[in-house]
Amino acid sequence: MEDYSAVQFVEENMKTIFAYALARVSDKADAEDLASDIILAILQSKDKIKDRAAFYGFVWGIAANTYKNFLRKRNKNSFSELEEDIPYTDGILEELCSKEELNFLRRELTLLSKEYRECTVAYYFDGLSCADTAKKLGISMEMVKYYLFKTRKILKEGIGMEREYGEKSYRPAKFELVTIFSGSYNAEYRNMFNRKLPGNIMLSTYYTPMTIRQLSLELGVATPYLEDEIGLLEKYGLLQNLGGGKYQTNLVIFTEEFTNEFYKTASSECTEMLKNILQGIRTKLEDIRNINFIGCELDDNSLLWALLWMCMRNGHSRFDSSNPRYNTRDMLYKGATGINYGVDYDYLQNLEKYTSLAFAGYAGIDDDYAISFADFGVLPKKNQYPGKSSCKEKLYTALEDRTKAEFAVMTTDEIKQVENIISDEIKDMADLYVYLTETAIKVMRSHSPNHVSDLVERIVGSTIFFRTVGFIGGCAAESGAVTVPEDDKAVALYAYTSKYGKEKCFDVC
């Protein structure tokens, strides 16, 4: 290598070399000494460079090596010995750094935002000039120099820091996105949270806005992989960009802490109200049986479970029509409107008696009949909806011989007669939904961050039916007005004629 190349480099980069030194030692005099050592080492090593294209990578490797020797001489830190006579290769960075330092460097590179990372990789790893880097990234050369300058400072500070990954990096939390929608099906949207990463991004940014860098540490995931996920969440409005590189979740999350407090707060009043409703229905069982529908001879407890579910459906319908403010829907994506909310816990682990894995206003049996049912978690599996084929068999048996009916089978007219008899209880059930909604809104306001406060009332009000089916079943059993059956017959369901028009099906909550 000709002498002038090394000399020319030193002359053109004198300020840069001094800035490099000053960024590593706080004292100006020490920085001047270090810069002098670096310049001397560069000039002394010029004969070791065999490839002109390797020049810039080599001299900055010399600078890094000189800095380590400088610190070692001053007994400020100890560094691994590096061989000075190392031939340049494409992997010069790995060869000039100890494994420990290389790991720190790689760690810090994974935390860089996209602009800084792409610029750094292009310049230092791909060996592009500032001009070529600017052309590749479509930015000005001044911006390239700015990113490189800032990156060196960021990396210097970061390499010396102890980083702690968040708990979600090794123990990802559970997150479920619940969507109640109408319109076209979007597979990308509906399957987005089948992966752990998007849900944990949502949970991490729920209470506190976070940058991608902060999320990277919290989740233990490099920023290049986070960027795509964040872009997808932004696309569907589930995550909002607050500016300044910070993101925050844009929906209400029903946390386990909220749910437990809601149950604790509402259970006593809910149980008492259900006791009065069921006792009121019990006093009317004779009038209900006089309608003479198939299954009217069932025991009181079996009928009460079925009538409780019928009362819930009608009571909520009355509540819903009286509270139109809860019925507004958002545009979720092209062709679909609805509402979203999140759930951050596995409700089967410790809240089973207040759950309902499935319920339906309409579950078709054949062209003429349908089943309406609720799988109250408080009931054993043997007393829950047995499935379409079993129900179909039991339905046909009852139609042939009504004395063998295991559940009520009604015509549309018979259902209307029953609803008229229990109209007062249906009104009381609507009042129960008012109480549950007001209680849930109050509790949610103490558990949700301020930025979703405008969403709380509508989301809670529009989802109260779906989220309390199992809770009402559990409170009903606790009231003592109904009991868990001793036999294996399914309760909390009834069949009805459907040829006059199918009813809306309530999906799994």
Image: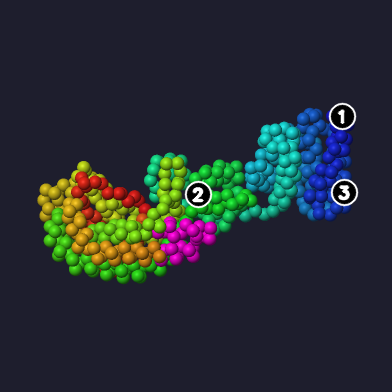
Under circle 1, the secondary element is loop
Q: Is residue 261 left or right of residue 500?
A: right
The amino acid pointed to by label 2 is Leu
**Residue 11 position within the rendered picture, expressed as x and y whole percent measured from the top left:** 87, 38
Q: Is residue 6 left or right of residue 322?
A: right
Question: Earlier along the polypeptide chain: callout 3 or callout 2?
Answer: 3
Q: CA distance from mark 2 to mark 1?
A: 59 Å
The amino acid pointed to by label 1 is Glu
Q: Please report the bounds of the magenta region as a residue range.
A: 439-461
Q: Quadrant of residue 141?
A: top right
Residue that appears at 31% across and 53% down: 359
User: Eyeballing the image, is 90 above or below 281?
Assistant: above
Q: Quadrant of residue 278?
A: bottom left
**Residue 399 position within the rendered picture, expressed as x and y whole percent measured from the top left:** 13, 49
**What residue did someone put label 1 on?**
2
User: Eyeballing the image, is 261 above or below 405?
Assistant: below
Residue that appears at 29% across and 57% down: 313
Regarding residue 482, the answer to whether it shows in the image is: no
**What residue did someone put label 2 on?**
238
